[in-house]
Image (tube, rainbow, N blue to C red):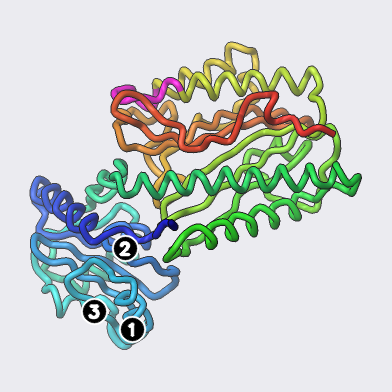
Amino acid sequence: MTLSHRLPRSFYDQLHARLRDRLHQSGLDAILVDDWRDVAYLCGFFHHPNERPGAVWISGDRVVLLVPELEREHALAQGAAVDEVVAFAEFPGRESPFQVLARTVGTHGRWGHSPTLSTGRLAELQEVFDGVTWTMSGVVDALRLIKQPEEVVLHRAAAQLGDVMLTAGRSLIEAALEEDDPLPTESQLADHVVREGARWMYSTHDDIVVVPMLTGGLVYAGENTAFPHGLPSKTRLEKGDTVILSLGGAVGGRYAESERTFFIGEPSTEQLRYFTTDHRAQEVGTQAIRPGVSCREVNEQCLDVIRDAGLAEFIRHRQGHGIGLNFHEAPWLEDGDTTEIQPGMVLSSEPGIYVPGHAGYRISDTVLVTEDGHERLTTYPRDLDDIIIAA
């Protein structure tokens, strides 16, 4: 049995009901969103964003999707969960694309717009909908914080994808060692895991939703691992290297990441010191994730492990972040975020230690907040004995 990436219409009907309750509580008659992720979240229409706008407008009794004409059939074929699809001819057009929406839904009321709306787009909307009072509203963002059971199924599958890619990456290194062949370069390893991830996806899933970075991630080795977001290069892996594979992708538009630090051969005393500290920080930080605790508190407990080990100078980032229709989204496991953690949130737990000129060390799991604690959705082994690749 294979997994479909498409959520049922009932998911969107229930989502619209929750959104309408929040609109009513906020004193809003409607809301308009134009970020492609918000559009996908609210109606299930996924598309490649470009200069042509796509938007969803939701009031107390209607859901209308605005798309360019070249996307109309695409939206209908995807079964967009809306009452009506309206399309503009082309961009920029002789009139604003939003004039089509205005003729459909009117130009009066108190409407919300998402915080991601650009100032240029807001000015355009104010001109077209000249009778509307616009208010920035985070009601959609607040709903996206808590994943519904149907979304958790997709995040769980995305976590499995990340684990599959890690297995593929390690296997390529091991195969080269066994054959006494040259080890792959970072870019060759990155290409391999991306292709293996996509191959697994298409062989085990139905109705694939393709989004930016369906499968991908960061692959780097040796001194390059000291750059937290280093990109794959032509650097060839070598025996003795620290290697970071930071991999993942999206199922049904919902992301997960699975990240491990490996050693090619027995690690040195220096490598062991940094790895064991980071491993302990990741364990403490992950165990701290539970309902009722603030993001700030979790981050402090996690990073204090590194500070207490005398390695504070090698901290470059927070413990983690929310994961949803974005790889990185709210809430943030960081000192500046006082958000209370709630069941249904999906978070990364990924403290890192980065020593310039030596190497970096990072372990990341995708973590689901449950009613009484948490669940690691990514399950690839993370302990020392499991991540040494025999050379």
Disc on the earlier residue, 2 or 3: 2
Q: Is residue 142 above or below residue 367?
A: below
Closer to the chain start, of discs 3 and 1, is: 1
Circle 2/circle 3 CB separation < 8 Å = no
Residue 268 highlighted magenta (yes or no) = no
In the rendering, at what x and y percent does residue 25 appear? 9, 45
User: Of the numbered discs in the image, which one, if any, rests on residue 86?
Assistant: 3
Q: Residue furthest front?
A: 1
Q: Nearer the viewer, mark 2 or mark 3?
A: 2
The residue that disc 1 covers is 69
Find the residue positioned furthest to the right: 180
Type of amino acid under label 2: Gly
Magenta stretch in the rendered image: 287-296
> Circle 2 — which element?
loop
Q: Choose top left, top right, bottom left or bottom right for residue 7.
A: bottom left
Q: Magenta region, mostly helix, strand or loop?
A: loop
For this rendering, which residue is in front, 334 or 136?
334
Q: Amino acid at mark 3?
A: Val
Q: Residue at x 88, y 46 (%)?
A: 179
- For disc 2, the marked residue is 44
